[in-house]
Image (cartoon, rainbow, N blue to C red):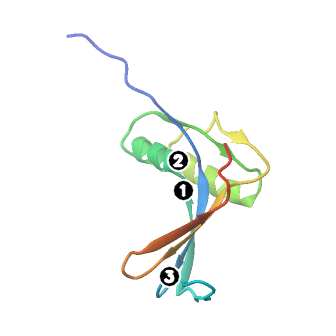
Amino acid sequence: MERHARPHLYALGYANVDVIANVPHLPRDGERVTSTSTEVYPGGMAANCACAAAQLGMPTDLLACIGRGGLASVLLEDLEARGVGTAFLYRDDATTVALITVTPGGERAIVSEPVAY
């Protein structure tokens, strides 16, 4: 039986911090809505993919750009805790933030800063 090397995932894309505001309804034009709760989570499609693969036992590295401040620490600590390799992260001045509003029924709207690559 032939043995093959174990695959290694290199996830290339972005990592950001998601600020999720749970709201009773999405705001209409010019309307202010008060959230019932607000949470902060690591996010970004490539980072989420890398975390999922690492948790399934696949060796994984993330190739992305993150900042140097406190928000970057949230991302870095989460990636390392989930077993994602961080040697290929590029450290820049800012970490991308996405504001996500979510209604009880699951409707959502996302406002994001320009993504750092």
Is 32 above or below relative to 65? below
Indicate the amino acid at tag 1: Gly
Q: Are marks 2 and 1 in contact (CB under 8 Å)?
A: yes
Residue that badge 2 annotates: 47
- Residue at (62%, 54%) from the top-left corner? 75
Mark positioned earlier in the residue sequence (2 or 3): 3
* The residue positioned farthest toward the right in the image shown: 93
Instruction: Say what secondary structure mark 1 lies in.
Output: strand
Q: Please tell me which residue lies in front, 73 or 110.
A: 110
Q: Are marks 3 and 1 in contact (CB under 8 Å)?
A: no
* The residue positioned farthest toward the left in the image shown: 1
- Residue at (38%, 39%) from the top-left corner? 57
Instruction: Say what secondary structure mark 3 lies in.
Output: loop
Q: Report the quarter where the N terminus lies.
A: top left
Give the quarter of the image for residue 3: top left
Q: Residues within 10 Å of mark 2 (few under 14, many from 20)?
A: many
Label drawn at residue 26: 3
Is 109 above or below relative to 26? above
Give the quarter of the image for residue 97: bottom right
**In x, y percent, where is residue 85?**
56, 37
Label drawn at residue 8: none
- Mark-to-mark CA distance, 2 and 3: 27 Å
Is 83 above or below relative to 39? above
Is residue 26 toward the left or the right of residue 53 in the image?
right
Q: Residues within 10 Å of mark 3 (few under 14, many from 20)?
A: some
Mark positioned earlier in the residue sequence (3 or 1): 3
Q: Report the quarter where the C terminus lies.
A: top right
Is 19 above or below relative to 104? above
- Residue at (47%, 43%) from the top-left corner? 50
Is residue 91 toward the left or the right of residue 43 in the image?
right
Instruction: Say what secondary structure mark 2 lies in.
Output: helix
Residue that badge 1 annotates: 43
